[in-house]
Amino acid sequence: MLDPFSLITNTMYGQFLYHAGQVDESIQQLRATLDMEWRFWIAHICLAKSYELHGMYGEALAACDAAFEFSGGNSEALSLAGYIHAVSGEKAKAEVKIQQLLERKANRYVPSYSVALVFAGLHETKTALQWLEQAFVDRDVHMVFLLDHKWNGLRSNEQFLQLVSRVGFWA
């Protein structure tokens, strides 16, 4: 590691572990990063993703709340919390997060990918794909994460596979 005290370097290492399927190691790395600086919201977002993959929904939602607070209201924290509510069976809470995202979108930038993610968690494929198509048009940087497990429910959908291909991945 180039700088063992760099919060972003340590956080990105934790995120790379998550994407490599080393979720336990990711959680350990991100907790260690937060031990250096509890308010580093990017580490909280990454930790929430690892917790969600492990089915640790309460911990994931707490990490989303911390990320939202310490970031000054980043929409990714709302989106991820909405997705977690959806996959954990709390449909009404997920729908509240969609409303919050749409209200924010009226006044500031909210990535279409973020809205699509919550709809994907709710298994509302058609609506999720509409938002993903808009994210593609918007050249949303988050589209590189279409290979993440959170999109597995759409993998058999031809429109999704075509979108993944247009992004530059092999479907």
Image: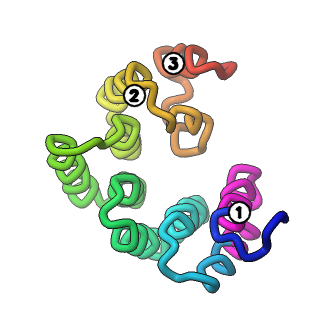
**Quadrant of residue 115 within the rendered picture:** top left
Q: Residue furthest bottom?
A: 35
* Residue 121 sits inside the magenta stretch: no
Q: Quadrant of the C terminus?
A: top right
* Residue 24 sits inside the magenta stretch: yes
Mark 2 to mark 1: distance in Å? Answer: 27 Å
Coordinates of residue 104 in the picture (x, y in percent): 19, 49
Q: Are marks 1 and 3 in contact (CB under 8 Å)?
A: no
Q: Residues within 10 Å of mark 1 (few under 14, many from 20)?
A: some
Q: Dot 3 lies on which element?
A: helix
**Residue at the spot of label 2:** 135
Q: Dot 1 lies on which element?
A: helix
Q: Residues within 10 Å of mark 2 (few under 14, many from 20)?
A: many
**Residue at the spot of label 1:** 9
If you read the primary sequence from the N terminus, does the residue marked by circle 2 or circle 3 appear first?
2
Which residue is drawn at the image coordinates 62% and 85% (left, top)?
35
Which residue is drawn at the image coordinates 40% and 42% (left, top)?
117
Coordinates of residue 148 in the picture (x, y in percent): 60, 42
Identify which amino acid the numbered label 1 is placed on.
Answer: Thr
Q: Is residue 137 visible?
A: yes
**Residue at the spot of label 3:** 163
Q: Residue furthest right?
A: 1
107 lies above or below 14: above
Q: Main secondary structure of the magenta part?
A: helix
Identify the magenta region.
10-29
Q: Report the front residue among 12 and 123.
A: 12
Q: Report the front residue among 117 and 15.
A: 15
